[in-house]
Amino acid sequence: MDIEDIDVKKELKIIFMGTPEFSVPILDALIKNYNVKAVVTQKDKLTGRNLTLTQPPVKILAKENNILVLQLDNVKEQYEEIIDLEPDLIVTCAYGQILPKELLDYPRLGCINVHASLLPDLRGGAPIHRAIINGYKKTGITIMYMDVGMDDGDIISQEEIEISDTDTVSTMHDKLSALGSKLLIKTLPSIIDGTNKRIKQDSSKVTYAPIIKPDDEKIDFSKSAFQIYNQIRGLNSFPGAYFMLDGKRIKVYESYIKEEYYTDKLDGEIVKIYDDGIGIKTGNGVIVLKVIKPEGKSKMRAIDYLNGIKEDLIGKIAG
């Protein structure tokens, strides 16, 4: 059937499964072009210092468009609630739960996923963070068929995008989310009429992007300045890289590299105060911290922090 010969928006039943802000532009594009029967997302969560009950971003968008929302505790046990809606196609993007085979096998057009990497590279839950932390010069979006394994289904389409030396996880998050929405709408017609590609992933080229854990956030100053610079921007603005100074945690959001070398100093030692930041010796060069968030305080310029504490930090060890 030629997609142009039918009113796809009315005829197809699409269920979208997603949760965070990254998923919102993808869902929005689907709503504007197709018939989204329901949105499946995670439960509302308590967030912030005041533990405010907060709705997932995709739930808010779905409600604004009068779309049914399902918030399942465990999709592996409650998948029949989705099957009862008789979806023709399921589209997922950062949903947060593994789908059971019974659900994957049900839609006549399959289950597809919008993933923020060029698979088979960076399978897993933190592909944007890991691409920047690992110093990648490019990444992209993959539209793929879902399988029982993690991000190992057949590739339908891909589009790459450059990562500049100044990009952060926040800037790439927004760029990739926009790219994902465009590529999905571009790809869907071929999925619907059965003309799409179906490319097996090369298992010899698989790499992984596990979710960020607390150990990933702590700066190790024995690493090179370049590695630390990538870590800082790869965690800016969420969740944020950090180090300890005088027993207090200081998060770092912006930095730059100085090719200055101190053979008589320790890694992590504060060696110089610049006009715009705090210089710390690394395993190779100096990393200058420009924007920080001291424990219990708001984000600020490092130079303002120095002016506020009235303390000489030269020679202190950050770790």
Image (cartoon, rainbow, N blue to C red):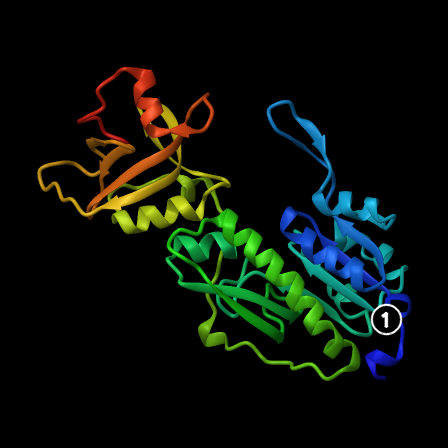
For the N terminus, the quadrant is: bottom right
Identity, as a three-letter code, of the amino acid under mark 1:
Val
Instruction: Give the residue drawn at x 56%, y 58%.
Output: 176
Residue 72 or residue 196, whichever sits in front: 196
Number of numbered labels in the structure image: 1
Q: Where is residue 200 in the image (x, y as percent from the top left)?
A: 58, 79
Q: In this view, does 312 lie to the left or right of 9?
A: left
Q: Is residue 247 visible?
A: no
- In the image: residue 2, left or right of residue 129: right
| Residue 121 can be seen in this image | yes
Q: Which residue lies furthest to the top in this view?
A: 310
Left/right placement of residue 237 relative to residue 111 reads left
Image height check: is 264 above or below 77?
above
Displayed quadrant of residue 137:
bottom left
Residue 42: quadrant of the picture: top right
Residue at x 61% of width, y 74% of height: 157
Q: In what element is the residue under mark 1?
A: helix
**How many C-alpha atoms fall within 10 Å of the one at disc 1: few (<14), some, or many (≥20)?**
some
Closer-to-camera residue (29/262)? 29
Up-down relation of residue 198 to residue 146 (above or below): below
Q: In the rendering, at what x and y percent does residue 126 appear?
A: 52, 53
The residue under the point 58% across, 72% down is 158
Q: Position of residue 10 (x, y in %)?
A: 91, 66
Q: Measuring 17% from the left and 27% from the top, which residue is drawn there?
A: 315
Q: In this view, does 27 lie to the left or right of 249?
A: right
**If the image is split into quadrants, where does the C terminus sit?**
top left
Residue, disc 1? 8
Which of the 4 image quarters holds residue 311? top left
Residue 174 at what x, y percent from top left? Answer: 57, 52
Residue positioned most to the front: 275
Image: 23 above or below 200? above
